[in-house]
Image (tube, rainbow, N blue to C red):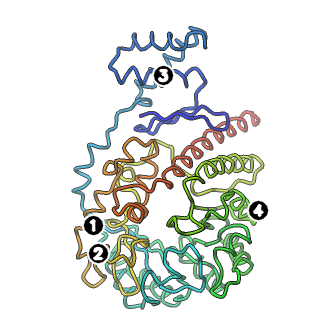
Amino acid sequence: MVHQYKNNGYNIVLDVNSGSVHVVDDVVYDIIPIVEEGLNTDTDTEAIEGSVLEKLKGKYEPSDIKDAFEQVIELKEAGQLYAPDIYENYIIDFKKRETVVKALCLHIAHDCNLACKYCFAEEGEYHGRRALMSYEVGKKALDFLVKNSGNRVNLEVDFFGGEPLMNWQVVKDLVAYGRSLEEPYHKKFRFTLTTNGVLLNDEVLEFANKEMSNIVLSIDGRKEIHDLMRPFRKGQGSYDLIVPKFQKVAKSRDQMNYYVRGTFTRNNLDFSRDVMHLADLGFRQISVEPVVAQPTDDYALREEDIPTLLEEYDRLAVELLNRRKEGKGVNFFHFMIDLEGGPCVAKRLSGCGSGTEYLAVTPWGDLYPCHQFVGKEEFLMGNVDEGITRTDIRDEFKTCNVYAKEKCRNCFAKFYCSGGCAANSYNFHGHINDAYDLGCELQRKRVECAIMIKAALADLEGEEENEEE
């Protein structure tokens, strides 16, 4: 499968199955689909060349067409173009693999001090009552993780909510307990913290900088947008309180190992302005993501918004490139993809690992496939005392991959999103092996922009090297 597109002056060709990316001239760009058509009809190389010459006659010089055709065939023979799909053959063995748990999302607090309008957790309650996780439940969760992690050494634990700083002492105590398990069990914990920043202070920051591998800071961008969607329960905005705190976090961590994470809605279809606003505030690690909401919500993204959003991603990509050239580069989460050698097999097939390698734990110790399934009783998998009791749910998630989703089979982006979010699929279609269509449109555009940025940065690096010489 080959995907071709033009973006910001570049002719880009992605060979989906090999992961190879090529930036080509107009002649090669026009030849590639003709060759692919010929290969699909089992026509021999000489006949394909004749077809290429005939179809492009008058548009390019015959000698240029022949040279370009030879380049295309060389790429094919090198396995970098028209590569076969070798991954579907792994599916049967992949389904049989032993499942180990490598990450937990600890819902340390089913409570929150904000009332964000788009919150899937219903102000931290997750379709239930407010509660804080006890130290005892948290200990059992870490014990469960160690026991079910097999030979895996590196384990991840995210302190999540609600707002985890509302249960800060338990967070600290669980970090200490986790550290006590590392040496005797030959494990290494990587702790992360997701916070809205309201309760962030110097003591929290000092501890987090010592113990947390990453900190996720929730902010939506411009003051008017943030305060509209992330107010306190009495209605006042939270922007002015959290911004200086977040700036202090970013500076204290040398602009690494954190990111500010925002959500854009129908209220800010011009979300590139929010990304740039966050960059202007001094943040260098930024994620601003589309809201996932039901059509009845007034802030929900609609199908009619897609053209505007696609243009906005293109605009953002160019703006980020310009800032990079000015020495003011930032990392935008959705434009960061690894093109070296293509995506790894495990990620192609397993995606985020929800329900298998990654689980969410409620304050009562219940286990769910991920934080977005918490409160949906049909996805209750077990608890930290008894472990996984619903292995059928785990097995269902184990088989959730791009080959199980009909919409993914012919999508060029399938090996970069690995089929998308299972929770979004369930919420919009009633089962996990479908795809959230609006999200797919945006994901495809993000992949295209990310590849274009890689191409442009390669050009920029080449220019800088030439200047040095």
Q: Would you place residue 355 above or below residue 136 in this image?
A: above
Q: Residues within 10 Å of mark 3 (few under 14, many from 20)?
A: many
**Label 4 vs 1, first from the N-terminus:** 4
Residue sitting at 51 percent across and 44 percent down? 339
Q: Are marks 3 and 4 in contact (CB under 8 Å)?
A: no
Q: Are marks 1 and 3 in contact (CB under 8 Å)?
A: no
Left or right of residue 115: residue 392: left
Residue sitting at 33 percent across and 75 percent down? 146
**Label 1 vs 2, first from the N-terminus:** 2
Q: Would you place residue 277 above or below residue 321 in this image?
A: below
Closest to the observer: 226 or 133? 226
Q: Name the residue beneath numbered marker 2.
A: 381
Q: Name the residue beneath numbered marker 3.
A: 72
Quarter residue 289 falls in: bottom right
Q: Disc 4 on helix, strand or loop?
A: helix
Q: Disc 1 on helix, strand or loop?
A: helix
Residue type beneath disc 4: Asp
Q: Name the residue beneath numbered marker 4.
A: 280
Q: Position of residue 397 (x, y in %)?
A: 31, 62
Q: Residues within 10 Å of mark 2 (few under 14, many from 20)?
A: many
Q: For the residues marked 1 and 2, what is the alpha-carbon distance in whole angstroms?
A: 8 Å
Q: In the drawing, what numbered circle is on residue 394?
A: 1
Indicate which label's residue lies in the foreground, 2 or 3. 2
Q: Would you place residue 360 above or below residue 396 in this image?
A: below
Closest to the observer: 292 or 62? 292
Q: Disc 3 on helix, strand or loop?
A: helix
Q: Disc 2 on helix, strand or loop?
A: loop
Indicate which label's residue lies in the foreground, 2 or 4. 2
Q: For the residues marked 1 and 3, what is the alpha-carbon distance in whole angstroms?
A: 44 Å
Residue type beneath disc 1: Arg
